[in-house]
Image: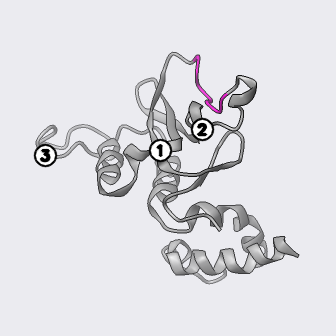
Amino acid sequence: MLTPLEQWYCDNCGEVIQSAREGYLEWLNDGKAHSFKIVHHAPASPRRPGGGDCYHYTRHRHRRDINLDSFVGPAGMARLLSFLDVGPIHDPDAEHSPQVQNMREFAELMRRLTIPYYEEALRYWSRADADDYFGGANEVWIYLPDTLRTLIERYGEEDED
């Protein structure tokens, strides 16, 4: 089991990012932020021995990136929320719209970075859905840490068989 909010799966190689310090968040910004990817920072990439890395947007002119540890914990939440609203000091009349292109994509990123067990539960999401694990659930229950942990325990055990 992943250590919640401390380990993630790399969106490029699929291997575990062992800590926020070993991860990087990349995205594109050509007016609004989009195409967010959590990847290994080059020094921690399993592809490094062969001279490669896990970055998606190395040569893209609209690439933005920062160490993943900048997006975890309370300071990370402040950074994430600034994509949605810079606050009353910088935008007193709330005239500026969120700086993300796709709210659903951004919500997924926030879930991965802030909800315990969500990252690992994603591995089993479609199987759980096919089994009607979420049947009758409201829009909050499926994202609660206890629900996600139970999902991992149930469907992760099937992978061990």
Q: Which residue is mark 1?
A: 21
Could you tell me which secondary element the residue under label 2 belongs to? helix
Amino acid bearing label 3: Pro
**Quadrant the C terminus occupies:** bottom right
Residue lying furthest right in this view? 161
Of discs 1 and 3, which sits in the foreground?
Answer: 1
Distance of label 2 from label 1 (alpha carbons): 9 Å
N-terminal label among 2 and 1: 1
- x and y, in percent, of residue 152 in the image: 67, 74
Residue at 47% across / 65% down in the picture? Answer: 115
- x and y, in percent, of residue 12 in the image: 68, 39
Left or right of 127? Residue 150 is: left
Q: Residues within 10 Å of mark 3 (few under 14, many from 20)?
A: few
Amino acid bearing label 2: Ala
- x and y, in percent, of residue 70 in the image: 37, 44
Q: Which residue is mark 2?
A: 44
Residue at 42% across / 39% down in the picture? Answer: 100
Residue at 34% across / 42% down in the picture? Answer: 83
Q: Which residues are magenta?
A: 53-59
- x and y, in percent, of residue 1 in the image: 65, 68
Of discs 3 and 2, which sits in the foreground?
Answer: 2
N-terminal label among 1 and 3: 1
Residue 142 higher or lower than 30, as above or below: below
Q: Which residue is mark 3?
A: 88
Amino acid bearing label 1: Arg
Could you tell me which secondary element the residue under label 3 belongs to? loop
